[in-house]
Image (tube, rainbow, N blue to C red):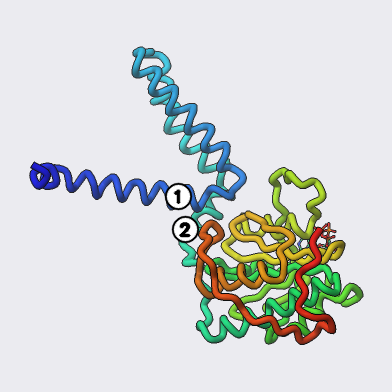
């Protein structure tokens, strides 16, 4: 009986699985974009209208829906062109870092040390770490460096009176690609009205790309990490190291919460001990 059912319907099963995977991947790629809510709203209206008109046989509404569908599809492509670009770029990106595991581990240690030192000294900073999607357009807005990343270099760049402190640093393949880069600021309304431009730029960049953004607040020393347009603010030193390990070493996305290996806590620039971050 069960065998017969499987024989008759295995194609449908695979079809449903394929469709569900596609819809989920498209949803994942577009969910952080500006037009996602509008699309969901429009889709819901269309589905409800179609169901109601079919159920009650409202012929005029059915006629309008069929005629309008093609025009609507074309209009949506034009209206949501920026979102489509972002979404398709995310879809094509493998979200992996192109450098080897060993180099990645060494970089994560150095990067964590750098951010924690900046935080302790309350030096404001913004980093973007490139993954699958290239950040070339944003690099063009700043100054190209192509240098080995080190906590000392990060401190020198973001030191308040340094010429390159304004803007963000782009890190690609564990090297500093450039600094003083301008990132796109999110257009979303923030629940927390105190979220300034640095943090909005971190959110904006990760909405449009698969990069990881890290911001250090000049005001409070708070460390924030941003992935897929979702910001986690005021992380403690331990939380920050764990989050980095989760992203770089276990390769988890920001919704997956399995504990990650903890990184070391050496602190080459700081004179103080291993205390946790100052929070807002
Ligand atoms: N679009 C942007 N791209 C990159 N960096 C930016 C951008 N906008 C602002 N910044 C950087 O952020 C700095 C501080 O901006 P602002 O004070 O509004 O941010 P904030 O989120 O309140 O951060 P903080 O807590 O450090 O004050 C600016 O001096 C500039 O260096």
Dot 1: what SS? helix
Identify the image quadrant of the C terminus. Answer: bottom right
Number of numbered callouts drawn: 2
**Residue 184 in sight from this viewpoint:** yes
274 to 59, vertically: above or below: below
In this picture, residue 265 sits left or right of residue 82: right
According to the image, label 2 marks what residue?
A: 91
Is ligand 1 within 8 Å of the beta carbon of the residue shown at mark 1?
Answer: no
Label 1 with label 2: CB-CB less than 8 Å: yes
**Could you say where residue 215 lies in the image, as x and y percent from the top left?**
74, 65
229 to 251, vertically: above or below: above
Is ligand 1 within 8 Å of the beta carbon of the residue shown at mark 2?
Answer: no
33 to 181, vertically: above or below: above
Identify the image quadrant of the N terminus. Answer: top left
Mark 1, residues whose alpha carbon is within 10 Å: few (<14), some, or many (≥20)? some
According to the image, label 1 marks what residue?
A: 26
């Amino acid at each position: 009986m069960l065998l017969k059912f499987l024989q008759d319907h295995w194609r449908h099963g695979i079809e449903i699985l394929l469709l569900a995977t596609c819809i989920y991947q498209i949803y994942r790629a577009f969910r952080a974009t500006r037009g996602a809510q509008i699309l969901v709203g429009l889709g819901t209206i269309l589905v409800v209208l179609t169901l109601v008109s079919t159920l009650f046989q409202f012929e005029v509404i059915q006629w309008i829906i069929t005629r309008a569908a093609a025009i609507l599809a074309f209009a949506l492509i034009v209206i949501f062109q920026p979102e489509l670009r972002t979404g398709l770029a995310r879809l094509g990106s493998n979200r992996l870092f192109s450098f080897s595991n060993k180099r990645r581990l060494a970089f994560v240690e150095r990067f964590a040390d750098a951010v924690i030192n900046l935080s302790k000294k309350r030096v404001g900073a913004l980093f973007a770490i490139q993954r699958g999607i290239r950040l070339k357009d944003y690099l063009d807005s700043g100054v190209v460096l192509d240098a080995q990343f080190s906590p000392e270099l990060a401190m020198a760049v973001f030191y308040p009176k340094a010429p390159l402190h304004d803007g963000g640093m782009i890190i690609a393949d564990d090297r500093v690609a450039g600094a003083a880069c301008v990132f796109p600021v999110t257009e979303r309304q923030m629940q927390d009205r105190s979220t300034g431009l640095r943090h909005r730029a971190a959110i904006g960049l990760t909405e449009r790309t698969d990069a990881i953004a890290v911001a250090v607040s000049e005001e409070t020393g708070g460390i924030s990490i941003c992935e897929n347009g979702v910001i986690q603010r005021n992380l403690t030193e331990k939380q920050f190291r764990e989050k980095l390990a989760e992203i770089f070493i276990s390769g988890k996305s920001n919704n997956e919460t399995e504990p990650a290996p903890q990184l070391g806590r050496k602190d080459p620039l700081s004179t103080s001990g291993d205390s946790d971050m100052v929070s807002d």
